[in-house]
Amino acid sequence: MASKIPRNAMSLKQFMLHQEVLKLYRSFLRSIKEIESPADRQQLREWVQSDFRKHRHETDEITIRNLVVNGERALKELKQSLALSRS
């Protein structure tokens, strides 16, 4: 009897890490929506998309974790910059 689990199914750790990456990506896009200038908004969106695409096929868990940590740091800086520009 063949297993119903696909050969390329993610482990629980991989799934959780994947969800973390998606959450970070969505957070970036939500934050970018707050930028007033359409040109700046488009440029930042393209930067985020290209950065995530560049590392799309990364499989090493440690490398992905480091990328997530760096992304969270960049997101925090973006949010702080947006808060300063509003005040």
Image (cartoon, grey):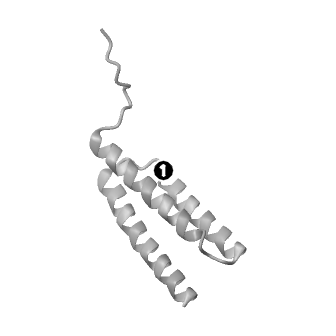
Say if 59 sits above or below 47 in the image: above
Residue lying at the far top of the rendered structure: 1
| Residue indicated by mark 1 | 56
Say if 2 sits above or below 48 in the image: above
The percent coordinates of residue 12 (x first, y second) are 28, 41
Relative to 20, 51 lies left or right: right
Residue at image position (42%, 67%) is 71
The percent coordinates of residue 43 (x first, y second) are 65, 70
Badge 1 element = loop
Q: Quadrant of residue 48?
A: bottom right
In this orientation, which residue lies closer to the viewer: 30 or 51?
30
Q: In which quarter of the image is residue 35?
A: bottom right
Residue at image position (57%, 86%) is 86
Report the quarter where the N terminus lies: top left
Amino acid type at image mark 1: Arg
Report the quarter where the C terminus lies: bottom right
Residue lying at the far front of the rendered structure: 87
The percent coordinates of residue 47 (x first, y second) are 59, 66
Residue lying at the far bottom of the rendered structure: 87
Residue at image position (38%, 31%) is 8
Neighbor class of circle 1 (other Cα within 10 Å; few <14, some 14-19, many 20+) is few
Q: How many marks on residues? A: 1
The percent coordinates of residue 73 (x first, y second) are 39, 73
Residue at image position (51%, 65%) is 28
Relative to 16, 33 lies left or right: right
Say if 85 sits above or below 65 in the image: below
